[in-house]
Image (spheres, rainbow, N blue to C red):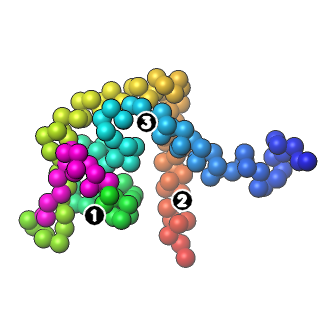
Amino acid sequence: MSDLLDTDDPLALEQQVCFALSVAARSVVAVYRPLLEPMGLTHPQYLVMLALWQHAPLSVRDLSRLLQLDPGTLSPLLKRLEAIGYLRRDRDPADERSLAVTLTTTGKELRSRAEQIPPAVVQRLGMPLQDLRNLHAALTQVINAAQPATTSP
């Protein structure tokens, strides 16, 4: 049997960037879950709300681009957020083919509760803030490096 820590194997699971990113993403989302549940939000819905708190109103197309989600994935998130009263989707008066997404008063008010989430996540992770900032910078580099690689034929 091969040693589990054998780093000479190019296919060793523990050496794969994709594995580390996948486990880290699931683990961090699990940290968010109990913080978001009282607000009735899933993590993907929270990301939509973050984008809207920062940039609303937005077209569905712009929101899709900002979140790097295809419209087919984004649409059910928006429908659910609209059903719970956090946002509205209306035809854009400037372009009837486009949907404009705006926050409701309830959606705007939710922001003050959400401001407690980032410090709570930092506390639950128990990592120095500078380490998290460095991780964010490194992940942003990975995202930027991967984008041209995924659009190449």
Where residue 104 sits, quadrant-wise, is top left
Q: Position of residue 152 (x, y in %)?
A: 53, 72
Q: Badge 3, how many Cα within 10 Å: few under 14, some, many 20+?
A: few
* Discs 1/3, front: 3
Q: CA distance from mark 3 to mark 2?
A: 27 Å
Say which residue appears at 28% left-offset and 64% top-offset: 61
Q: Which residue is mark 1?
A: 61
Q: Which residue is mark 3?
A: 33
1 or 3: tag closer to the N-terminus = 3
Residue 76 relative to residue 32: left or right: left
Q: Nearer the viewer, residue 143 or 93?
A: 93
Say which residue appears at 43% left-offset and 35% top-offset: 32
* Discs 3/2, front: 3
Label 1's element?
helix
Residue 27 relative to residue 36: left or right: right
Magenta residues, as a range?
Answer: 77-92
Q: CA distance from mark 1 to mark 3?
A: 27 Å
Q: Nearer the viewer, residue 147 or 73?
A: 73
Label 2's element?
helix
* Discs 1/2, front: 1
